[in-house]
Amino acid sequence: MDTVLEMRSITKQFPRVLANDQVDFDLRHGEIHALVGENGSGKSTLMNILYGLYQSDGGEIIVRGQKVDINEPRVAIDLKIGMVFQHFMLVEPLTVAENIVLGSELRKGPFLDTKRAIQEVEELSQKYGLRIDPKAKIADLSVGLQQRVEILKALYRGAEILILDEPTAVLTPQEVEDLFKVLRALRAQGTSIVFITHKIKEVLSLSDRVSVLRRGKKIGTKATSETNEQDLAEMMVGRVVLFNVEKKPAEPGEDVLYLDRLSVKDQFGQVKVKEVELGVRSGEVLGIAGVEGNGQSELVEAIAGLRKTAGGRVFLNGQDITDWSPLKIKEAGFGYVPEDRHRRGLVLDYSVADNLILGFHGKKPHVRGGVWRDDKAIEENAEKLIEEYDIRPPVASQPARSLSGGNQQKIVVGREFTQDPSLLICAQPTRGVDVGAIEFIHKQVIAQRDRGAAVLLVSAELDEILSLSDRIAVMYNGQIVSVMSREEVTEHKLGFLMLGGRLEDYRAGEVNGHAE
Amino acid sequence: MGDILALLFNTAVFGAALRMATPLIFAALGGIFSERSGVVNIALEGMMLMGAFTAMFVSHQTGMPWLGVLGAILAGLLVGLLHAVFCIHYRANQVVVGTAINIFAGGLTVFLLRYYFGAAGTSPSVATIPDITIPLISQIPWIGRIIGRQNPLVYLALIAVVVAHIVIYRTSWGLRLRAVGEHPRAADTVGVNVFRMRYLAVALSGALAGLGGTYLSIAHLSRFSEGMTAGRGFIALAAVIFGKWTPYGALGACLFFGYADALQMRLQDIGIPTQFMNMLPYVLTMVALAGFIGKSVGPKASGQPYIKG
Ligand SMILES: Nc1ncnc2c1ncn2[C@@H]1O[C@H](COP(=O)(O)OP(=O)(O)O)[C@@H](O)[C@H]1O
Ligand SMILES: [Mg+2]
């Protein structure tokens, strides 16, 4: 296979970090080349240099045998390089067709030839099997469809080299499957693809080759067939990574959280949680598995006091805490790792130190005399937690925004866990978090359990549920359809239940031998 | 009661409304272009003032009011470029720059007025652009009495609204303009030059505001007086928001504000204070911003300087 692209010894220095340190990278015609590495390892930087958004401080780029100088996106576009960004580059009030032609408009004199644009987009979407309505407004499309528009944008400009920056981060599992189909079809048609991710499973299922970056340096390139999960994780993190958390058997005690026929509505008045009855005992992890959108978020928010209940009661340590204010619930011994850390877990523009006291900012020792900040105590608290929870870089004064997803999550985890709450809810605790930090957070969750906390874990990642939980509840359509002990559960059985299957049917299928 | 109704639908009031609206329309269109590109332009007031002065000055020197129009456009354009350099190149706070330009324009015009004419307050009377009669339209009953005989700048303003609409929604330049004001990085990644688009848009904005000023000094009146824009730049800005950043919407708002203006003198006679009507544009803008009449949301990147890379 011919090499269509070569990047040699690319170096990029940002004010504080060396984002790329003499990185070599090459792409062959018609391959899917995965580019992996933990958050902040320099993947996006490398590809932004290729696309002309950043200028490298050293190194050279060779496209189809020609040395090129890509100093702006226009040049990359002319070289038939297309990029789908992690944060979509779509203008929301404009239509699909307008977004696709923007910058390369079809014209009649000075006027837009909208009719032809729509027609060409239709043809393009048919050719590649990417169905889309060219007249739809971007703002009205789902994330999956928006990504489709991004891919079409690149193809419309004749891209033969397609870069996708963490395209699966925002997609549901079903959308990920669809995307993979599209990418495989594109590869079959001769498109060369760079696929950025930090999810190892995706690498193994999709790519032909894989390159690993760590802290700005290229660690290696391998044929995907010659590597495996453990090997890749080690290359990414730089040490052996444990995928299965080691833990002792649980020693559960009394119910710490008890939900008595709890119902919750969403903001549109739709009943999202229907009379859920559930107990979580001290010293155990109860995992809630389920496809997202089946009421898990509403359930958790109702317990946390962030959403009014529509019926039923919530008990914490025997005390009725239904519809208490979030602060009061917190003070009653509740720790919470919210699913959206940016909206609910952190104030991104505040320093790491300030984020580490959020929710406890009005309490001693952070406040003196009921009013005054005690900067020294806040600083001490930060230093202690940064050390204990391995938050990197270890700078208390930095804004939380400047940290990687994994380290941001460690702030939330550290802040909540250090209070030793009797009930801990972790919602999607490792979403957008890299391998090394996942391992760390998992260990901490188990440590909390062993301390005697009742842990309610909500996750869309089956692996996470399976490896942490002592009991597993499946939520479907607002109801808990079954609660099983870890031993009773297989991945396959969970998948079946999560999609609305009934346990009786599953058992029947097992007996008859066609559960598959 | 009948009296009030007759007053509200009086053709003379409507005609006056159209005239009062004209400078607002030009400036509002300017505001639209600037904001659509992502640059907040509260300097409209100062740009109008510079336009008004320059129009008077050129007309005074040459005796040719149409040259004055040209001069005003140029003056507005230059002030627009000044605004652009600070906002786009130096990434200064756009509201602060706009305010500075307003103060600067206020001072400069007063200085120039006194320097050239030695007079405080107002300039001598200069040649103006005369009204014209549109042959067939002036024959139409009722309508004819409103728009049949007006100043050419009034007609020009109406035409400008249509042209602006076409430019923004039907041309590739307009598509890029909208993209740059909403999501400049997206535009950048498809090869659109964000800085050039913004410079052009802000310069155009200044030219239009300057043109709006022209109407005040050499069409509506025949002289320049200190601070004669009297907040019209801000009212135009209100019209931009009230009209949801669209030319037709802004036209509607300007006509409404113009109508209120025309009405106020007559309403005074029946006991409604002038101040009440003067308040109207601002109150309505707040109502629009608060989302009572459907939310008015501007271009997303408006006010944010673009930093490449
Ligand atoms: N525009 C920028 N200015 C300063 N630092 C940056 C910039 N972009 C990225 N970085 C830093 O460079 C490093 C690599 O970032 P990035 O390439 O985005 O990593 P990845 O895509 O692998 O997560 C990080 O430490 C990040 O903070
Ligand atoms: Mg990245």
Image: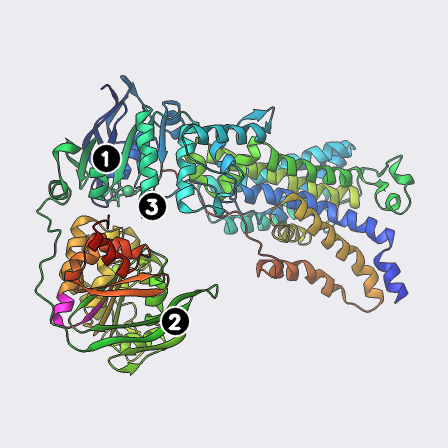
Which residue lies most toward the top here?
A: A65
Q: Is mark 3 within 8 Å of ligand 2?
A: no
Helix or strand or loop: what does disc 3 sit on? Answer: helix
10 Å neighbourhood of mark 3: few (<14), some, or many (≥20)?
few
The reply to whether the C-beta atoms of the residues labelled 1 and 2 are less than 8 Å apart is: no
Q: Give the spatial CA distance, label 2 vs label 3.
A: 28 Å
For the N terminus of chain A, which image quadrant? top left
- Specify which label sits upstream in the sequence, 1 or 2: 1
- The residue shown at (52%, 39%) is A95
Q: Give the spatial CA distance, label 1 vs label 2.
A: 44 Å
Q: Is mark 2 within 8 Å of ligand 2?
A: no
Q: Name the one closer to the observer, B101 or A273.
A: A273
> Which residue is identified by label 1?
A34
Write down the chain letter for disc 1: A
Helix or strand or loop: what does disc 2 sit on? Answer: strand
The reply to whether the C-beta atoms of the residues labelled 1 and 3 are less than 8 Å apart is: no
The magenta-colored residue range is A447-455
> Which residue is identified by label 3?
A174
Q: Is residue A460 above or below residue A28?
A: below
Write down the chain letter for disc 2: A
Amino acid type for the residue under numbered disc 1: Ala
Amino acid type for the residue under numbered disc 3: Gln
Helix or strand or loop: what does disc 1 sit on? Answer: strand
Which residue lies most toward the front here?
A: A512
Amino acid type for the residue under numbered disc 2: Ser
Label at residue B278: none
Q: How is the image coloured?
A: rainbow
Q: Name the one closer to the observer, A311 or A43.
A: A311
> Which residue is identified by label 2?
A263
- The residue shown at (39%, 44%) is A144
